[in-house]
Image: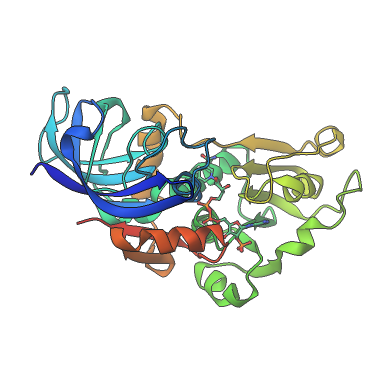
Amino acid sequence: MTTYRALWVTEEPQFKQQVIRRDLDELPAGEVLVRVHYSSLNYKDALSATGNRGVTRNFPHTPGIDAAGVVEHSTAEGFVPGDEVIVTGYDLGMNTYGGLADYIRVPASWLIKRPAGLSLREAMILGTAGFTAGLCVYKLVRAGLQTGDGDVLVTGATGGVGSVAVKLLSQLGYRVVAATGKADQIPFLQELGAAEVIDRAELGEGTDRPMLKSRWAAAVDTVGGDVLFNVVKSLNYGGSVACCGLTAGTHFNGNVFPFILRGANLLGVDSVELPLVAKASMWDMLSLQWKMDLEPLVDEISLEDTPQAIARILAGHQKGRVLVNVI
Ligand code: NDP
């Protein structure tokens, strides 16, 4: 095998994505060659695939911040051909050719051995988005959130991070309120376990007020911007919000009142540069105590289908997780 398939993004002058064959020799230097079985699509992949320089500086490029597959060749201690591995984050798919391809070549320090409780397919249904949902919930629980504390809000609820957060929180016994812009997806969110679904527009009201009525015991916020500010202002006393996303904006216009009057906690979540040992322990949680039935939220596609799926993500029309079958 000297060539492999890859989603190839070129700039000519419009950004264009197509699946073509490339030479294996063109993969970057690295210790471990992995035959990818599954990848997934995340918001960040859609940005990389359409030329966002904040994600990917140089083109042509192969996006894909997630990959799960089997080691084919390794010069690193601890990995041998046949090992099943997962990579999420670090530089994969950003400025290193990513998982939307038959093969990746990466440093061993990015690899996690597949935990026994998850198949490679299940790991990529979760992917970075599901993994991040897990981190958000973990941070809320560590900050003291208990079932019975009240409503837990999830914003961007039909998205990748949001849908897994709804599923996980409801499975753990929390009363989940899902905020969405997709009125037609209420049944989908209820099936995932949302006790209540609200229109995302509701969370944009009251930006000019210093505080809002207490409403949420906690929140997983995947959208940022004014929504995040309003969520912070409407946390219950001692409540926490896990902040991980920016689909509604990167700005945050805060004031100190929620923090000094209600003891609110704003918890930052990063899945990319998290040390490998912490990543491995979150994957273990997701494979055991927090194992979920993920089938209701998966949309499985082939590598050839990825350009259309990327357009759906950017238009805000995708729901749940997009699994890319690369076998
Ligand atoms: P998706 O595209 O799958 O979901 C985003 C969701 O946000 C949409 O489905 C929609 O949900 C909602 N949304 C879209 N546009 C707007 C808008 N203008 N205002 C309010 N809500 C909007 O993305 P992901 O779930 O993959 O990622 C979500 C966010 O989290 C992204 O910003 C991503 O970059 C970030 N992220 C961060 C990580 C980290 O490590 N910190 C890791 C992974 C993701 P609905 O229609 O239901 O409202």
Residue 293 falls left or right of residue 254: left
Q: Residue 251 in the image: x percent, y percent?
A: 73, 39
Q: What residue is at 54 percent from the left and 61 percent from the top?
A: 170
Q: Which quadrant holds the N terminus? A: top left
Q: Toward which corner of the image does residue 81 lie, by quadrant?
A: top left
Residue 150 appears in the figure: yes
> Would residue 106 be found to the left or right of residue 44 on screen?
left
Q: Position of residue 276 (x, y in %)?
A: 37, 29
Relative height, residue 170 to residue 253 (above, below): below
Colour scheme used in the picture? rainbow
**Residue farthest right in this picture:** 209
Left or right side of 217 for 9: left
Could you say where residue 117 lies in the image, as x and y percent from the top left?
27, 50
In-image side of 228 versus 58 (left or right)? right
Examine the rendering and report whether any part of residue 288 can be seen: no
Q: How many marks?
A: 0
